[in-house]
């Protein structure tokens, strides 16, 4: 039996995907996932986020809880990686000297070597690189889902938003070649995956490195030619770089979902300028208008920050006005969080906490009203649902299962009315009987149920395990089949 590991992931989808790479690296090095309630792993890896203000406290609190556990289990190792590790570097070992390894966002592939070096030298190893060592997708991955996979198309960001620390921690944008991306998508589909989500800090600027501003729209269309790939999603686009060809690709490529998550951040042009968001509210709303004209059924979600330094009540009202005009199906709303190292942290006119809370509550109330109104329009409609695992926290109590409709909405549905059990990874059609602001309910008999290979794999406890894919192809053509490296499914 090899040494066991556990990865604790915080933050965005990019971090979740990085953790899949870390798991693949550890398993290639002979580690196995820890199993059984209460079992203590030999290695605990924290993959951290630095976007929110409480990220530091959360990490050091968790490290503190592990300290006595490590004392009781000689040989146990603790590693800290991700954005907070890139930011704090040696500070982590100073504040938590029982940590064995600290690694950054640019060298996740070094983790197994650093663990071995820390064990051999009997001292902490801190390795933070200033630029990308290898593109993360060239590394092996142990995928978390049998039916849905993350695929990075780029890492890093060339924008300079004053509230955001990500460019400082992830570096400037590095784009993968289209052939690499498509090879990884094909590798996942060959393992039974039905849905992929293309990831980038700014997917719309994809292609900047190889001089093709229309590369992202072409990539979406190329995904449409992959047999067995039923759903394609992407996150996150930037309004500045959003071009009409992407909208056309979404509308004209059958497996690209009619779902768009496009951060607004503020509806005030004055605040957008202070944020260095290089678009204005009129431009933002014009994109939404074009999307809805091409895809009337599109579900559009967003991110909004409340209480940015200098925000007045007039600025906040402008945000409410844009939310009313945009009619988002959902919004991730945040109270502004000061992050050391960002220009906004030193700005004058920081908004008092009680004012920020009041505005936040008012925005949430408005958006819930809009979301509920949008969802109620779907009552009586039949939706296609990719059955998920762990999406419905009350499923056991309600005897329901849950999954995502093609537009990304969460649907809780009745399990009855079909032959054989419904599994995560299967596809069902269900008629909506009730709508809430954040989900839909379908309590009648299922209209249809399709058992899938992804469902077979999920039932068997198998997950895709993909080797690194790095072809370096500059075009969108079919990659050589011998260059697609695919590992077999392995039980966790």
Image (cartoon, helix red, strand yellow):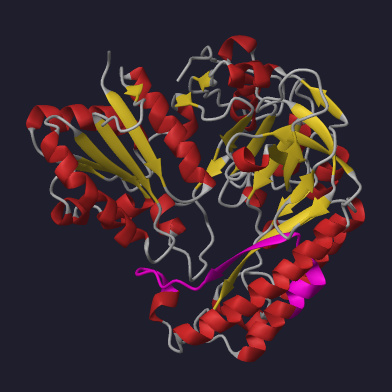
Question: Which of these two is toward me, 286 or 384?
Answer: 384
Report the span colored magenta. Answer: 321-343
Task: Kindly identify the residue that appears in the image at 34 percent across and 25 percent down.
Answer: 26
Residue 147 painted magenta: no
Relative height, residue 474 to residue 269 (above, below)? above
- Residue 337 highlighted magenta (yes or no): yes
Relative depth, front residue between 73 and 210: 73
Please say if 365 is above or below 474.
below
Q: Is residue 168 above or below residue 312?
A: above
Residue 385 position within the rendered picture, expressed as x and y whole percent measured from the top left: 77, 36
Quarter of the N terminus within the rendering: top left
**Which image quadrant: the C terminus?**
top left
Q: Observer-nearest residue: 394 or 277?
A: 394
Give the side of residue 82 with respect to residue 300, left or right. Answer: left
Identity of the residue drawn at 74% across and 44% down: 411
Residue 174 visible in image: no
Q: Quadrant of residue 451?
A: top right
**Residue sitting at x 45%, y 57%:** 166
Residue 353: image location, x then y, percent: 45, 83
Q: Position of residue 247 (x, y in %)?
A: 82, 50
Horizontal side of residue 95 vs 106, given as left or right:
left
Q: Classify residue 253 by image quadrant.
A: top right
User: Which sits in the foreground, 108 or 53?
Assistant: 53
Residue ID at (46%, 32%): 20
Left-right relation of 108 to 313:
left
């Amino acid at each position: 039996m090899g040494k066991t590991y556990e990865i604790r992931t915080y933050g965005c989808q990019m971090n979740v995907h990085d953790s899949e790479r870390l798991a693949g690296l550890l398993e290639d090095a002979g580690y196995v996932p820890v199993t059984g309630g209460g079992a203590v792993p030999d290695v605990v890896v924290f993959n951290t986020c630095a976007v929110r203000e409480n990220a530091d406290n959360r990490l050091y609190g968790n490290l503190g809880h592990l300290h006595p556990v490590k004392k009781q289990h000689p040989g146990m190792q603790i590693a800290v990686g991700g954005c907070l590790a890139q930011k704090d570097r040696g500070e982590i070992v100073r504040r938590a000297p029982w940590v064995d390894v600290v690694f950054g966002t640019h060298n996740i592939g070094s983790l197994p070597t650093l663990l071995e070096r820390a064990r051999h030298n009997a001292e902490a190893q801190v390795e933070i690189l200033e630029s990308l060592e290898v593109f993360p997708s060239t590394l092996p991955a142990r995928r978390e889902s049998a039916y849905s996979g993350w695929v990075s198309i780029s890492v890093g960001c060339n924008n300079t938003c004053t509230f955001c620390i990500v460019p400082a921690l992830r570096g400037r944008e590095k784009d993968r070649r289209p052939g690499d991306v498509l090879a990884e998508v094909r590798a996942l589909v060959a393992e039974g995956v039905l849905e992929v989500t293309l990831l980038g800090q700014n997917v719309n600027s994809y292609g900047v490195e190889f001089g093709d501003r229309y590369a992202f729209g072409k990539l979406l269309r190329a995904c449409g030619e992959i047999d067995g790939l039923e759903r394609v999603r992407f996150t996150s686009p930037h309004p500045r770089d959003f071009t009409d060809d992407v909208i056309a690709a979404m509308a004209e490529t059958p497996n690209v979902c009619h779902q768009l998550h496009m951060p607004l951040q503020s509806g005030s042009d004055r605040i957008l300028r202070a944020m260095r968001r290089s678009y204005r509210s009129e431009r933002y709303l014009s994109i939404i208008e074009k999307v809805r004209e091409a895809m009337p059924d599109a579900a559009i979600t967003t991110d909004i920050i409340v209480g940015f330094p200098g925000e007045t009540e007039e600025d906040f009202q402008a945000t409410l006005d844009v939310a009313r005009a945009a009619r988002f199906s959902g919004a991730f709303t945040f109270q502004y969080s000061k992050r050391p190292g960002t220009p906004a942290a030193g700005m004058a006119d920081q908004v008092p906490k009680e004012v920020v809370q009041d505005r936040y509550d008012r925005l949430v109330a408005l958006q819930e009203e809009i979301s509920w109104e949008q969802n109620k329009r779907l009552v009586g409609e039949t939706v296609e649902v990719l059955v998920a695992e762990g999406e419905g926290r009350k499923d056991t109590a309600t005897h329901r299962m849950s999954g995502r409709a093609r537009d990304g909405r969460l649907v809780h549905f009745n399990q009855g009315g079909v032959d054989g059990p419904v599994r995560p990874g299967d596809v069902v059609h269900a008629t909506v009987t009730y709508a809430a602001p954040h989900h839909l309910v379908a309590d009648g008999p299922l209209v249809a149920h399709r058992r899938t290979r992804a469902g077979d794999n999920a039932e068997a406890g198998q997950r895709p395990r993909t080797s690194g894919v790095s072809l370096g192809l500059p075009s969108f053509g079919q990659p050589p089949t011998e260059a697609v490296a695919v590992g077999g499914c392995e039980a966790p």
